[in-house]
Amino acid sequence: GIRVVKSYTRESHEISKFGRISQRIYKDFSKADRVMSFNNPLMMVCVYVSMILIAWLGAKQIVASGNNAALGLTTGDLTALVTYAMQILMAMMMLSMVFVMCIISQASAERICQVLNEESTVTNPANPIKEVADGSIEFDNVDFRYSDNSEKPVLDNINLKIRSGMTVGIVGGTGSAKSSLVQLVPRLYDVTSGSLKVGGVDVRDYDMEVLRDQVAMVLQKNVLFSGTIAENLRWGNPNATDEEIRHACQLAQADGFIQEFPDKYDTYIEQGGTNVSGGQRQRLCIARA
């Protein structure tokens, strides 16, 4: 949001906020390092106390037996005992370091597991339909809520029929659920009640990949990925030929400005499409659709 920050001359506010957050992270890491710094000295104390005890008790055994192996411990036995004990204690030290690292990584692991184990509420039916007959769309008493806990539905009792081939404009004020209505068609969300049919079949009965292959969307926020123009357009159809790509761009009124670039369709697009204008981004997204 650097352009917005500059437009409202809020650099000092953002720098201050960044400083506060950085200071909090610094304190957390410093506290963790102070705690960890006690681990090594504590383990070394344990190791040397153990060595002293083994040497003292072993020496008493050797003196008591008069270095006679038949009666007790010998000097050689004590040397071997010290060596084995040192190896075991060093392994214990390494284990303690691993334990500390596990504690540090636990928070990250929990968050990663939350993401990996998250299950989508939108799933394929048991026996999905693999073909969309036509482009007709029918909303039949459709209600929709983003959350089951919402007081009011976003869409309430919507009835709408759009024949295949029709061009329909959905007009309304800000927050009147225009985007929500459209996003139900490719099943980005499921209707709360009622039914939504595409080609005369409820969208919940289709295989999601088949349905979404037949429904193309260009949202308000146009997203381009890093790569060439041709690579971005092939998101819509990975097997599209160069001629098909150019034809789509001509229909979307994008071919004109693409031809002005030195590399034409091989022009590299930066992440988010920052090296093309907003209008050019939108026309490329329409061509991709």
Image (cartoon, rainbow, N blue to C red):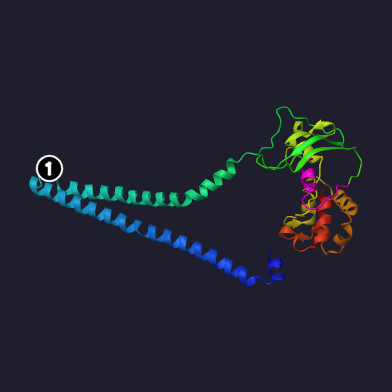
- Determine which quarter of the picture holds residue 144: top right
Q: Write down the region rendered in magenta.
A: 169-185
- Magenta stretch, overall SS: loop
Position in image of residue 7 (x %, y %): 72, 70
**Residue at point 77%, 51% (across, down):** 175
Using residue 154 as the reference point, say whether residue 82 is left or right of it: left
User: In the image, what residue type sits under mark 1?
Assistant: Gly
**Residue at point 27%, 51% (across, down):** 86
**Residue at point 51%, 47% (across, down):** 109
Does residue 61 sit above or below 37 in this rendering? above
> Residue 37 versus residue 25: which sits nearer the camera?
25
Position in image of residue 279 (x %, y %): 83, 60
173 is within the stretch colored magenta: yes
Q: Name the residue under label 1.
A: 72
Does residue 215 sit above or below 79 in this rendering? above
- Determine which quarter of the picture holds residue 210: top right
Using residue 190 as the reference point, say whether residue 85 is left or right of it: left
Does residue 2 sit above or below 134 in this rendering? below
45 is within the stretch colored magenta: no
**Residue at point 27%, 53% (across, down):** 46
> Residue 97 versus residue 191: which sits nearer the camera?
191
- Determine which quarter of the picture holds residue 271: bottom right
Position in image of residue 23 (x %, y %): 50, 66
